[in-house]
């Protein structure tokens, strides 16, 4: 558990909200890519960032959307759509937050096209309005559904968060290359990089959330008994 906390701390403390250019070197699924950031210092006119040195590979999850899993119906089509949009291309990434896997969550654009919105517009992903306030995605999804585009041509398309609950990953399995091992039964959670106002274990809903506030936000009081494990009721026994 201590090694997990150290790993999460290293990932979280190094991440920062910024915009940078990168080349997509792999598309994991319909909402996750692996990129290689350009340059080291002041890439593309942006200030240098200690967390992203030249040549570093970065896993990025597209913000505001949730695509079908690879083993789920329409998962391959969703991945192929994203591959056609960004595969081996130079893109701009506007990082927004971290998720519980330590991935950057952000907006991706190529040739001034918002790729996140394009996936929803094509019917290749669900909008994820629970974690954002941009209703543009809701409108794009409604239009895709009415036109029976992509996954909306299925009789009863299943949302990926529902699919994950019915198909939990075995312990040690990884969803789109997370930095830790999780059972994968919950939707992908996004955490506010400004840290918000949560300061007590009673405000937390999962060990993932606890680890974010404990490591990234530095809320030391979550480890009230100083045993190195924050919020024992949620995190004790976690691997």
Image: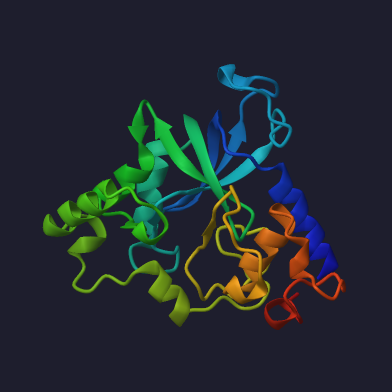
Q: Residue at x 57, y 75 (%)?
A: 169
Is residue 35 placed above or below 152 in the rendered structure? above
Q: Nearer the viewer, residue 37 or 100?
A: 100
Residue 5, quarter of the rendered image: bottom right
The residue depicted at 60 percent of the width and 63 percent of the height is: 198
Q: Residue furthest top?
A: 45
Q: Name the quadrant containing residue 72.
A: bottom left
Can residue 119 be seen here? yes
Rendering coords of residue 160 (x, y %): 39, 68
x, y percent for residue 57: 66, 40
The image shows residue 153, relative to residue 162, as above or below, that is: above
Q: Quadrant of the C terminus?
A: bottom right
Q: Residue furthest left?
A: 146
Q: Is residue 82 left or right of residue 46?
A: left
Farthest residue toward the right? Answer: 227
In this rendering, the answer to whether 114 lies above or below 179 is above
Q: Residue at x 63, y 42 (%)?
A: 58
Location of residue 226 (image quadrant): bottom right
In the image, is 226 to the left or to the right of 153?
A: right
Which residue is nearer to you in this view: 178 or 74? 178
Q: Is residue 156 left or right of residue 108?
A: left
- Tell me if 147 is positioned left or right of 124 in this view: left
The image shows a total of numbered marks equal to 0
Q: Position of residue 197 (x, y in %)?
A: 58, 58
In the image, residue 202 sits, relative to residue 30, either above or below, namely below
- Colouring used for the render: rainbow
Residue beneath the point at 41% across and 75% down: 163
Q: Viewer-proximal residue, 228 or 64?
A: 228
Which x, y percent locates residue 168? 53, 78
Which image quarter is the N terminus in?
bottom right
């Amino acid at each position: 558990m201590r090694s997990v906390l150290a790993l999460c701390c290293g990932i979280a403390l190094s991440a920062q909200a910024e915009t940078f250019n990168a080349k997509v070197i792999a598309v994991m699924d319909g909402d996750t890519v692996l990129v290689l950031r350009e340059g080291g210092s002041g890439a593309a006119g942006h200030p240098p960032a200690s967390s992203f040195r030249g040549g570093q590979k970065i896993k990025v999850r597209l913000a505001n959307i949730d695509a079908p899993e690879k083993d789920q119906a329409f998962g391959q089509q969703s991945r192929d759509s994203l591959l056609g949009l960004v595969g081996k291309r130079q893109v701009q990434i506007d990082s927004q937050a971290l998720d519980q896997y330590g991935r950057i969550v952000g907006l991706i654009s190529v040739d001034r096209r918002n790729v996140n919105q394009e996936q929803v517009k094509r019917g290749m992903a669900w909008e994820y309005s629970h974690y954002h306030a941009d209703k543009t995605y809701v409108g794009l999804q409604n239009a895709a559904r009415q036109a029976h585009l992509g996954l909306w041509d299925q009789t009863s398309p299943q949302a990926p968060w529902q699919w994950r609950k019915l198909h939990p990953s075995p312990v040690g399995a990884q969803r789109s290359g997370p930095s830790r091992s999780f059972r994968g039964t919950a939707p992908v959670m996004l955490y506010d990089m400004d840290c918000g106002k949560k300061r007590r274990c009673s405000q937390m809903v999962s060990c993932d959330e606890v680890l974010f506030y404990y490591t990234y936000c530095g809320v030391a009081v979550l480890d009230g008994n100083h045993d190195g494990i924050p919020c024992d009721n949620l995190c004790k026994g976690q691997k």
